[in-house]
Image (spheres, grey):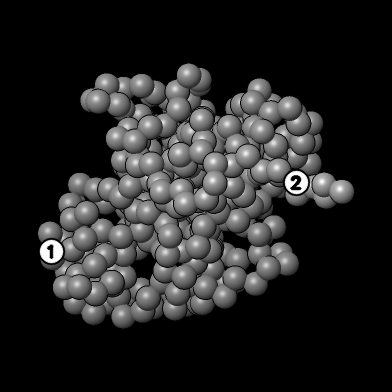
């Protein structure tokens, strides 16, 4: 979507845009958008100290109105943490017949981390997020997204949406990858607010869902209710898994729209984190080429 200054956070941030047909990383600071000489992959190979020096090398200004806003992601993998708020633990225990796994992971030293998306699949602010047609219960999950570099240092924050199928996950926790990883299931934006400019550990996070112009969910919580520190989650993610161009990590949800709400095509989802910005997306039903998911074991008929 075309960039409007009102969509960008007040704090300095890294913005990915299309300008004259080319994808470009830019720095938004003091109401000006300036081109960066390096891409996000290059910047995230550096330490924070070296990256701050590299950000001083800008290559001319950009007309905000002539740019399209993209998700602030290049080749980064997106990972997600689960059951990091008591509300998420409760919701999962309500929907699942395997309640014990959620109760245990909430208290365990090792957090739950799962792969969420390849970088190129991530939807940005103003884009369309998906629901699977074989899911009977789908929800957006508003989460603080944390960007780390290849050295495991926290570099930036954004709003994230971990679109999920609660019916598929609720059937059996082993279906988690299908509940979480499908077309348009991950959205991050509007930009990457630099970590030395923002301190979201006590920020309010809110989500509003509207259907046909009417609010069908409006809730808020606080990042401080998380039982884990974002830096702790980042260090576990990097512990045994090299990430040469860094990664985004969605840090878990505390806002769960109660049933009978299930996300439907045309719903509008708006997620806001104080000091980090607002991420808005429309819902679409994503194509599903496979059979309706009724997995059966092949049995030997003899
Ligand atoms: O345990 C399953 C996923 C949990 C999750 O995505 C969350 O707590 O946000
Ligand atoms: Mg989640």
10 Å crowding of disc 1: few (<14), some (14-19), many (20+): some
10 Å crowding of disc 2: few (<14), some (14-19), many (20+): few
Return the disc, 2 or 1, that comes first in the chain's sequence: 1
- Looking at the image, can residue 256 be seen? yes
Instruction: Measuring from the top left, give residue 288's x and y in whole percent.
Output: 46, 48
**Which residue is drawn at the image coordinates 57% and 33% (left, top)?**
166
Mark 2: C-beta under 8 Å from nearest atom of ligand 1:
no
Q: On the rendered structure, is 298 left or right of 118?
A: right
Of 186 and 25, nearer the camera is 186
**Which residue is drawn at the image coordinates 54% and 41% (left, top)?**
292
Determine the CA span between mark 2 and mark 1: 54 Å
> Which residue is labeled 1 in the image?
66
Quadrant of res 102:
top right
Question: Looking at this rendering, what residue extends furthest in the top direction?
Answer: 260
Say which mark, if any, is on residue 297: 2
Q: On the rendered structure, is 30 left or right of 138?
A: left
Q: On the rendered structure, is 5 left or right of 233?
A: left
**Which residue is drawn at the image coordinates 67% and 43% (left, top)?**
295
Instruction: Measuring from the top left, give residue 124's x and y in whole percent.
Output: 34, 53
Instruction: Measuring from the top left, give residue 205's x and y in whole percent.
Output: 44, 35
Helix, strand or loop at mark 1: helix
Quarter of the picture holding the N terminus: bottom left
Instruction: Measuring from the top left, give residue 64's x and y in whole percent.
Output: 16, 61
Q: On the rendered structure, is 153 left or right of 1?
A: right
Quadrant of res 254:
top right
């Amino acid at each position: 979507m075309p960039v409007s200054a009102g969509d960008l956070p007040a704090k300095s941030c890294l913005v990915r845009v299309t300008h004259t047909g080319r994808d470009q990383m830019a720095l938004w600071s003091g109401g000006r958008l300036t081109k960066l000489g390096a891409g996000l992959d290059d910047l995230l190979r550096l330490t924070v100290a070296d990256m701050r020096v590299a950000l001083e090398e800008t290559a001319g200004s950009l007309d905000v109105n002539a740019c399209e806003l993209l998700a602030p992601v290049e080749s980064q993998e997106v990972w997600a943490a689960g059951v990091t708020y008591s509300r998420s633990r409760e919701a999962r225990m309500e929907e699942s017949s395997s309640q014990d796994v959620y109760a245990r992971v909430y208290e365990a030293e090792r957090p739950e981390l799962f792969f969420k998306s390849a970088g190129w699949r991530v939807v940005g602010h103003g884009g369309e997020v998906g629901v699977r047609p074989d899911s009977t219960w789908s929800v957006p999950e508003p989460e603080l997204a944390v960007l780390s570099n290849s050295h495991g240092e926290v570099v930036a924050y954004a709003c994230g949406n971990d679109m999920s199928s609660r019916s598929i996950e609720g059937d059996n926790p082993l279906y988690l990858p299908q509940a979480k990883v499908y077309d348009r299931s991950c959205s991050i934006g509007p930009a990457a607010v630099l970590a030395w400019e923002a301190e979201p550990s006590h920020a309010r996070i809110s989500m509003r869902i509207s259907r046909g112009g009417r609010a069908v969910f409006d809730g808020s919580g606080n990042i401080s209710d998380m039982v884990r520190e974002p830096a702790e989650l980042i260090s576990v993610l990097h512990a045994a898994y090299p990430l040469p161009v860094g990664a985004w990590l969605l840090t878990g949800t505390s806002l769960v729209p109660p049933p009978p709400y299930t996300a439907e095509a045309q719903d509008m989802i708006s997620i806001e984190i104080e000091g980090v910005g607002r991420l808005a997306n429309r819902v679409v039903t994503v194509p599903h080429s496979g059979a309706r998911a009724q997995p059966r074991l092949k049995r030997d008929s003899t």
